[in-house]
Amino acid sequence: MKVLNNLSDPSLVKIINSGKIGIIPTDTVYGMVGIASNPDVANKIYSLKRPGITKKGTLIAANLDQLEQLGSLKEDLLNAEEYLGRGVSVIVRLKKNLNYLNFDTGCQAVRIIKNGPLNNLLTKVGPLITTSANYGGQSTVENIGDAIKEFGDKLDFYVDGGHKNGIPSTIIELIGSKITVIRQGSLKI
């Protein structure tokens, strides 16, 4: 298990690209993350987080192009662009080859991280699958020390981001111009 002091640590890109999973500070809460293009990574995250439960995570990316290249449908991304740029997670359709990310539902919440060290990391590694840093049904950890106590050697790395307030992203479903709030979070819709 490796503990890093920040998202700009040069070894983090290599660690993530090698298929390791860990906890990082996201734009909202601490998140358990791994490279989204690797089915084994996604399966490991889901089986550790919620064994036997099919609750999918969120894809985070640096820009729309990364999400489209991974397999999000361009028309959904363009329809959601206004919200994605504000840090809202929007449910979009994904191509069938990504069913390992969403338990064969064909859709996934996605979010764009526009600025800062997390954007820089995502620019280098591509989209990450993420889920809050906690076991299913428990509170999200608010600092890296609690994350290490919670998960220990079950994860490959931890990145310290100081205290995080524990308010997750808002998740919406957008069909045409109709918005349905799935989860009210850090940004009020």
Image (cartoon, rainbow, N blue to C red):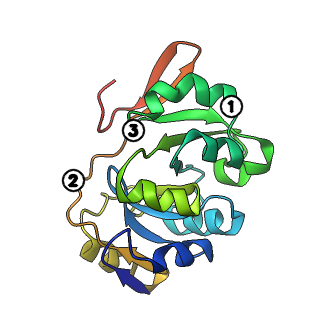
Query: Where is the N terminus found, in terms of image quarters?
Result: bottom left
Whether residue 43 is situated above or below residue 64 in the rendered picture:
below
Numbered disc in front, either 3 or 2: 3
Badge 1 element: helix
In the image, taking residue 91 as reference, residue 93 lies left or right, namely: right
The residue pinned by badge 1 equals 74
Of residue 166 and residue 26, the one placed in the foreground of this image is 26
Within-10-Å neighbours for mark 2: few <14, some 14–19, many 20+ = some
Whether residue 40 is situated above or below residue 18 in the rendered picture:
above
For image coordinates 58% across by 54% down, the residue present is: 127
Of residue 18 and residue 187, the one placed in the foreground of this image is 18
The residue pinned by badge 3 equals 87
Badge 3 element: loop
On the image, the x and y values in percent for residue 100 come to 71, 54
Mark 1 → mark 3, Cα distance in angstroms = 18 Å
On the image, the x and y values in percent for residue 120 come to 44, 58
Residue type highlighted by circle 2:
Asn
How many marks on residues?
A: 3
Which image quadrant for residue 5? Answer: bottom left
On the image, the x and y values in percent for residue 134 come to 38, 63
Q: Earlier in the sequence, mark 2 or mark 1?
A: 1
Residue 165 is labelled as 2
